[in-house]
Amino acid sequence: MSRLLRGARLGSTKKDIVDFVSSLEADQRLLESVVKINKAHVVMMVDCKIVDQNKAAKLLNALNRIDVNADITKADSEDVHMYVEEIVTESVGSEIGGDLHIGKSRNDQVATAIRMKLREDLVELIFKLAELQSSILTVAEKHVGTVVPGYTHTQPAQPITFAHYLLSFFDAFNRDIERLTESYERVNQSPMGAGALAATSFPIDRERMAELLGFKGVMENSLDAVGSRDFMLEVQSCLTLAALNVTRLTEDLILWSSLAFGVIDLPDEFSSTSSMMPQKKNPEVLEVIRARMSHVAGGFLTTAMAMKSLPSGYNLDLQEITPILWETIECMSSSLSMLIALVPLLKISSVSSNLLDFTTSTELANVLTRKYKVPFRSAHRIVGALVEELVRQKQSLSDTTSELLESVSTRVSGIPLKVSAEDIRSCADPVQVVEAHKVKGGPSPEEVKRSLEARAQVLGIWKETLSKETDRLRKASDELQFLAEQYSTLSHGYSQGLRGWKST
Amino acid sequence: MSRLLRGARLGSTKKDIVDFVSSLEADQRLLESVVKINKAHVVMMVDCKIVDQNKAAKLLNALNRIDVNADITKADSEDVHMYVEEIVTESVGSEIGGDLHIGKSRNDQVATAIRMKLREDLVELIFKLAELQSSILTVAEKHVGTVVPGYTHTQPAQPITFAHYLLSFFDAFNRDIERLTESYERVNQSPMGAGALAATSFPIDRERMAELLGFKGVMENSLDAVGSRDFMLEVQSCLTLAALNVTRLTEDLILWSSLAFGVIDLPDEFSSTSSMMPQKKNPEVLEVIRARMSHVAGGFLTTAMAMKSLPSGYNLDLQEITPILWETIECMSSSLSMLIALVPLLKISSVSSNLLDFTTSTELANVLTRKYKVPFRSAHRIVGALVEELVRQKQSLSDTTSELLESVSTRVSGIPLKVSAEDIRSCADPVQVVEAHKVKGGPSPEEVKRSLEARAQVLGIWKETLSKETDRLRKASDELQFLAEQYSTLSHGYSQGLRGWKST
Amino acid sequence: MSRLLRGARLGSTKKDIVDFVSSLEADQRLLESVVKINKAHVVMMVDCKIVDQNKAAKLLNALNRIDVNADITKADSEDVHMYVEEIVTESVGSEIGGDLHIGKSRNDQVATAIRMKLREDLVELIFKLAELQSSILTVAEKHVGTVVPGYTHTQPAQPITFAHYLLSFFDAFNRDIERLTESYERVNQSPMGAGALAATSFPIDRERMAELLGFKGVMENSLDAVGSRDFMLEVQSCLTLAALNVTRLTEDLILWSSLAFGVIDLPDEFSSTSSMMPQKKNPEVLEVIRARMSHVAGGFLTTAMAMKSLPSGYNLDLQEITPILWETIECMSSSLSMLIALVPLLKISSVSSNLLDFTTSTELANVLTRKYKVPFRSAHRIVGALVEELVRQKQSLSDTTSELLESVSTRVSGIPLKVSAEDIRSCADPVQVVEAHKVKGGPSPEEVKRSLEARAQVLGIWKETLSKETDRLRKASDELQFLAEQYSTLSHGYSQGLRGWKST
Amino acid sequence: MSRLLRGARLGSTKKDIVDFVSSLEADQRLLESVVKINKAHVVMMVDCKIVDQNKAAKLLNALNRIDVNADITKADSEDVHMYVEEIVTESVGSEIGGDLHIGKSRNDQVATAIRMKLREDLVELIFKLAELQSSILTVAEKHVGTVVPGYTHTQPAQPITFAHYLLSFFDAFNRDIERLTESYERVNQSPMGAGALAATSFPIDRERMAELLGFKGVMENSLDAVGSRDFMLEVQSCLTLAALNVTRLTEDLILWSSLAFGVIDLPDEFSSTSSMMPQKKNPEVLEVIRARMSHVAGGFLTTAMAMKSLPSGYNLDLQEITPILWETIECMSSSLSMLIALVPLLKISSVSSNLLDFTTSTELANVLTRKYKVPFRSAHRIVGALVEELVRQKQSLSDTTSELLESVSTRVSGIPLKVSAEDIRSCADPVQVVEAHKVKGGPSPEEVKRSLEARAQVLGIWKETLSKETDRLRKASDELQFLAEQYSTLSHGYSQGLRGWKST
């Protein structure tokens, strides 16, 4: 409001300065929430007997007529708050229109509107992460028995299955969902009633405002309510963690689908090819996603830097961090959409055998210890020597014979070990080795199936929770609109009855 | 282990390369956890009949003799894992010592040890944040009636109380505690049994390992268990948010204690003065804290950058982010200690009256609306004109007379308002104005007292929760040690009985 | 090009995927440069006898008709390169249009276009920094004698002048200009001819291309030319350093213009006020600038993160960092414009005397040493005791009498010092003290005047340099256009003559 | 100094607070510079007749006896400045010792000392980058004819040579050297004489101080001299850019040395292997380097964040950023040492032919255009169809016959092209194709040889420049020490003569 009055006191303000400090562009997203807040505020003021019903009816009538989808970015208003106030004032005159302002301020209103919009965005983002988990499960179910190399240090280390690999990302994204869900609770708190910083001397009802706007509680301390933005930073940090998980997935997919690795076949529509170089399938979508994840992390830093050492209370710096939040969400949301569509189309190429060679040697040592009672250290020494021998002869582990193993074992440890060809074969076979790794969380098909089922259940719970919250928000919104319409037409004595609406 | 064997295969390794990749310095913090993990692993292997009791007794005997406070930074080992293994092997010989390695790997062991140490650190950090909240309550209780300017845009905006101001930070730190507490749950999961990346074919019991080490659950997917570090990033992001809150508090205190603001008197021992410039009290401790908070944020970024696009599975890059975690915790912990000691010593100087002048004007307009039924917009116009008049006469709001207000009101709005001197006086008095702001979360002493009591209860709950968790961890540790000692001496047939120990 | 052909080979591509990887929006800025590059490429190919003059004339005719100000963001092309190629192909047919592609690739073309646009932006940014220096000099010249407190630790420390203060920022921004000027040299290198990554087997003339496009040299190594983006990171890091300097200036101005400090009076049009709180002048423009500087730093980080561990060669990640560069430049440019307009309007309020009190004590000690030959340490002890005495008596340094000083000095050091009232007075007078600090770079008016003159000269040199470079770029552009028109109409045998055009 | 006096005025200071604000640990690196500054200051004060020769001799005697390699980290001093002052004072008494302080302050002294140390570190770092360039040249010279795939999008794109690839990094590091060399000029400026912030009223000679300390100039404005740290940020940003270049090199080497790519064979001593998995060669050193480069970038951010919105003038925050600078340098320096040793040992494995297949197709189209005058677009269409045919027949480009090409060409474009088997063969042979790419900066052996020679010359110039600067610094240091010794023993009248020493 202060700036509205500036013209009168300070002479004309230059347009470029106004443009420079304007927030209208980023405010577009807040229009619907700001209208809702004003409606709820009028309803609450009637209930608290701060404004009378006639005035309230006029205000609500004007508010009900506002098109919440209008393009405000070119409007002549300073921001979304003035835009709404100006429309109302034009309709009902400035004396009545002014009452819209009783007991509130742009400082609490903007904080509230951001939280309302962010709440919606969070529900959508969490839903998308759950959809990505769905995509992962879909592919994983097909590849419970598909053996691929498990990598450490970008080198094949042990055989696992593609399903087992994919589940590692299911679990990582699950933690991302957990974090976002927890941050949602802190977002879903109402600052309304905190005023500019010191609340108000009008007898407003902050809990009622929170309820009308679908919030789970009130940001109590009025300074904290208007001046804190850690709810935004928290969401951005959760998204940064998710983004880092995404970069690791995209990196894997880019590498594994490269001609060199040749493990994964990327879907055509998500890559580009050249008629001249058919071997080349550029993972363009994955590269763009990988790069955009840096934008998410960079957005967090930008916000952190803007908040660093900012004196408490509202400062206009706070206005400048909001657009970054929206960009971050946009960036994450579109990238997740791509992955949701891409992941189910992933195909496994036949894995080149040299990528798996010797990755099962450790299992042979394990079997010597487990079944042939060779001490663990000796078993390792024997297998090490065996492998050295095979490499010298340019052979692979499956070329091991019982005789060779016995001779190596005798030489190295003095024990003439007699290991059955069957045991050797099973240790050289990546499929059988994978099957043997059946402890909880291991790659064996049996365990992975159990794991898939358990995760399908987790996913079901996420989706149900999201669905409930979506319903809750919609109901709160419907109830507010119902009240806004009733209060805009009815005469005296109705408010008690209306308050009971919700419970019916 | 792989590097241990390098000497034999690759010829001598240059010392500077070994030093370059060594993690020994940062590993110091992990020694105690690594010893515990090894003890638990042996106990579990006996229970699962993977090693026999005689071997186990020897291993545990050796493990029990390790001094967990030894300085390992100058040891000749490659890392803390080899340090422990080498001590055991020296004591029991390599054949038996080698069994320590059955079904585990450095990859799962290091992830587990970091989580155990971090768990402790988190409990301590959360406790310190709660202590800082205690400090805040202590000072706030003394200043429920101490009126200070509330600032927006670094300018005095409305009168509040120092207690109300301080509570805004109580609430901010409360969210920090919430976040850290939630992240604790994700830290407190056991990766043991995940092996190098693919679990193991030995029939180990991962849940039992988790239980023995005091974890609440198992990091199931073996790839995820060894290759993910989002638990570290999450803690660092929570600490970054807390750090930003701290910078805002220190910024306020530095400004408010400056000669210019003169609102706060910093305790002498936390500032430096000069005999030549007695007006100068340099807020050195606060400045150092402010700067170090950037280290916390920078640590998060460093880690994020190191993780960005890292292929999944274990890579040695992961080793290089651990020291940053410890530095971040050190940095936060020492800074919180300073604030815990400093805050209770804060004193309020008598606030210069010009900092409060006119900050109550809005309240006069509110009263015109509330009590004298002037439309809100008109009330504002009248008070605006009044203030203009007072400024012209170089007077302050308290110089307003009923006559002046009537004449201004008549001129501006045509209404010859008759406002009692009593009402004017109360609107010009910051103390009374503060008292009028009594809605939930407002600055009125009455509301602030309620708020203080509610927060004292919250604090009580935090401390009780922390105390319970500390007990739980200690009990788990005691039980493990009990078993490690029993298994190191007893003969057959005891394990079933011992497993019941916990419940007695 | 590869993606153009996708339709034929891979079936229809979903629109959302195309949108996701599209760079059209950010490409708008590159249109003019891309057209120029194509013109220069054709001209060069004629000179090198790679295409014949007839084909070249047709191609240039089509290129000359392209509206470089057209809005391409809604075009149906994949990117700006295809946009230009498609227009040309439509005009001259695909067989001739295809020749536009001989010996070049989108990879070298995009790197070249970015550099050309960035070159312009850099000239403008450097010019704005120089304008800001001009603004600083303008105000500084008025305040050579205006004494203000010099601060350390946010506390008044020693008296300086406002001019001296302002010059500290002149010098800081001068280093920013130096850095940007140096980075300009590395930006101003032509990648053209590097092809996709391996240059080309056509006998193109890379130096000639560089010359036609106004570059000072060629990015030689073809891999480096297309795959490196450190020129962007370098500019962003220079701007980050400048941004940090700006935040320090804005922070000072926000503090100094606060009611508490009261040193500076902000121009009305750059702040907002309230009719209700006339003491409140919210430094909104400065706050927005302060916050936006974090966007600059965040942009650097985003880019750094995107480049971290990116395999060499072109990856589509590179496309995603370009928009950040443009946002950073926009952000910096608009903020500098605000400061350029704001700084000359700064006014100094009369500085409250308590902010200067005792800030000159050190000078009294200096005089005792210099003129009265008291050892430095004793002089300090004497003045310390004197100040203590004055504070106890609630007096200020100017209340010191010769007698008081003698008595304190006798007590403290046994020396009955006789200091003239004149000497004491001059040491207690901030104006005289400032005048005494006349060493190079000190605050004395005499030295500051010299410094102002020297800096006016520096500024003159910057502006001349910028003007020369602007001319050089314009001439190169004019020459290219001249050739593009000549080659599009003339017949055989002209090229040698044309090459001589430049020198006439 | 202020804190020194605190004891007397404020009662005992708690040890943990002193420890918290202490900078002693990071100060160790500054000891030698601080001693030199004090010597130079005394010499200058004698020349300027501020202190007499007797006092100066005593001071210099004491200073000359200080062991600049002493471990000060456990000393009982507050910082390195007090450490030096206390030693001198102990030796000559506080009255004379106090004169060391005339006309200087810790604020200018610490800024000067950091610049002196950083100057040395920069010379060393630049030298290491040049050594890395040497290493690159050494390997490149061996591989002028070694054809490897050039990658885009992590996919083989065109054939290049390993030498050509390596030169792309030579050039990138060359820009890093340029940037560091330019930043060196801004580091190499003397803040001495700026005092606490306002210079001094003593007639010191700032240029003389600069000269004695080997600086190229004076940081003129006294506020700027003590309060700015952009010289540190600039160096850190240059190192961040270099670090990003390093991560791209390490990423390439990690990928190319992976079993999947199999292009590069890492030297054994820089990787770890396993006796059980001989195919696994973990690139441990490269991974550690890759991760540590994030520390460099993170250090820049930490510093930027600490400087953001810091009021001008000295604040203790500045102390907290210095240790990060040293860590960054340490980190970069040790990583460069590893690379310098590793790069010359790189070996190329025989590149699997499937990685090069079809990478030369474009060249065939080029030849059709260049030699057979087929329009470029048609040529591409023909080769595209040819490749499709070959892929269908599971053949490679070298299987193309003149007949096949003719039939495809007839079908696609109606032209019965007759291309010689010789031309086809040369286009299918990566070696010949590479040879054909001979434009400036291209991969042809001829051009690469020219490039290698030119770069060897560049390198020679860097090394000579570094060597000259090292000499200059050593001479300045020697001269200072000569004067410090002369002034500590000689009697009157010598100073003029001594000033001439340098030129003899």
Image (cartoon, coloured by chain):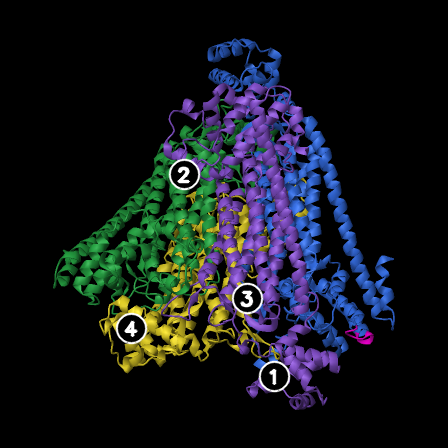
Chain colours: A green, B yellow, C purple, D blue
Residue range of the region highlighted in magenta in the rendering = D49-55
- According to the picture, the residue beneath numbered tag 2 turns out to be A166
Q: Which mark is residue B399?
A: none
Q: CA distance from mark 3 to mark 2?
A: 46 Å
Dividing the picture into quarters, in which one does residue D203 lie?
bottom right
Is C490 within the magenta?
Answer: no
Q: Nearer the viewer, residue C496 or A133?
A: C496
Q: Is residue C420 left or right of residue A77?
A: right
Q: Which mark is residue C398?
A: 1
- Which of pointers 1 and 2 indicates the residue nearer the eye? 1
Q: Amino acid at mark 2?
A: Leu
Q: CA distance from mark 3 to mark 4?
A: 56 Å
Q: Considering the numbered disc 1 on the image, is that residue within a helix, a strand or a loop?
A: helix
Q: Are marks 1 and 3 in contact (CB under 8 Å)?
A: no
Q: Considering the numbered disc 2 on the image, is that residue within a helix, a strand or a loop?
A: helix
Q: Can residue A415 be seen at all in this image of the molecule?
A: no
Q: Which mark is residue B288?
A: 3
Q: Amino acid at mark 4?
A: Arg
Q: Amino acid at mark 1?
A: Ser
- According to the picture, the residue beneath numbered tag 4 turns out to be B411
- Which of pointers 3 and 4 indicates the residue nearer the eye? 4
Is D53 within the magenta?
Answer: yes
Q: CA distance from mark 1 to mark 4?
A: 50 Å
Q: For the C terminus of chain B, give its image quadrant.
A: bottom left
Q: Residue at 46% x, 71% y: name it.
A: C259
Q: Residue at 20% x, 53% y: name it.
A: A481
Q: Sequence-wise, which precedes: disc 3 or disc 4? A: 3
